Image: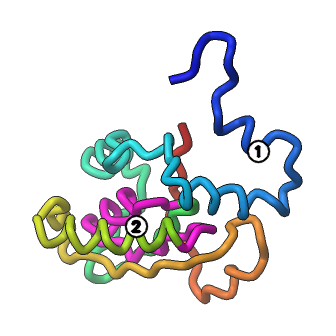
Amino acid sequence: MTSPNEQPRLPVLFEGASPQDHATRWAKCWDEKFTPWDRGGPSMALYDLLKENPNGVIPLPSESRPKTALVPGCGRGYDVLLLSSFGYDVYGLDVSSQALDAARENAEKALAEGLYKTEGSKRGAITWITQDFFAEDWKDVKTPFDLIFDYTV
């Protein structure tokens, strides 16, 4: 916790950094195990939206119409796992290889413990991608996305 006169650490880390330097700064956060944005679970607002789907606002997958989703800056992959449990084939994208190592570990543990029950007709596939969302190089993924979900505190 910062004192009232002290700036929070995360904004200071990025202050004055060019966009090209951001990937290195995010990786540094993971190296130092400094992840204040990590809530320890998926977005409950996303869960509620998927579960309730008022007026069909979210394109839900079905056997005859599979859907794909992208979670940029996926971190430990909580939202990736949630979307997969609803049947989406999900791409979890993060600039940090440490984040995706943590996501793979989290996925293995969470699925073994049954934390993400299958909500759709089947669980969707998960693909982890270590790339910068703002760079062009990851865009060689040959699929359109039906849903892109990002949540930032």
Give the residue pinned by disc 1: 14
Q: Earlier in the sequence, mark 2 or mark 1?
A: 1
- Residue at left offset 76%, top offset 57%: 22
Position of 55 with respect to 34 (left or right) is left
Residue 129 magenta-highlighted: no
Position of 3 with respect to 103 (left or right) is right
Q: Nearer the viewer, residue 74 or 60?
A: 74
The furthest residue to the top: 4
Give the residue pinned by disc 2: 102
Q: Nearer the viewer, residue 31 or 16?
A: 31
Q: Quadrant of residue 68?
A: bottom left
Q: Residues within 10 Å of mark 2 (few under 14, many from 20)?
A: some
What's drawn in magenta, residue-wise? 74-97
Residue 8 in the image: above or below residue 62: above
Residue 81 magenta-highlighted: yes
Image position, residue 75 (x, y; %):
48, 60
Spatial distance from mark 2 to mark 1, Cα to Cα?
A: 23 Å
Q: Secondary structure at mark 1?
A: helix
Q: Residues within 10 Å of mark 1 (few under 14, many from 20)?
A: some
- Residue at left offset 51%, top offset 56%: 149
**Count of numbered labels shown in the rendering:** 2
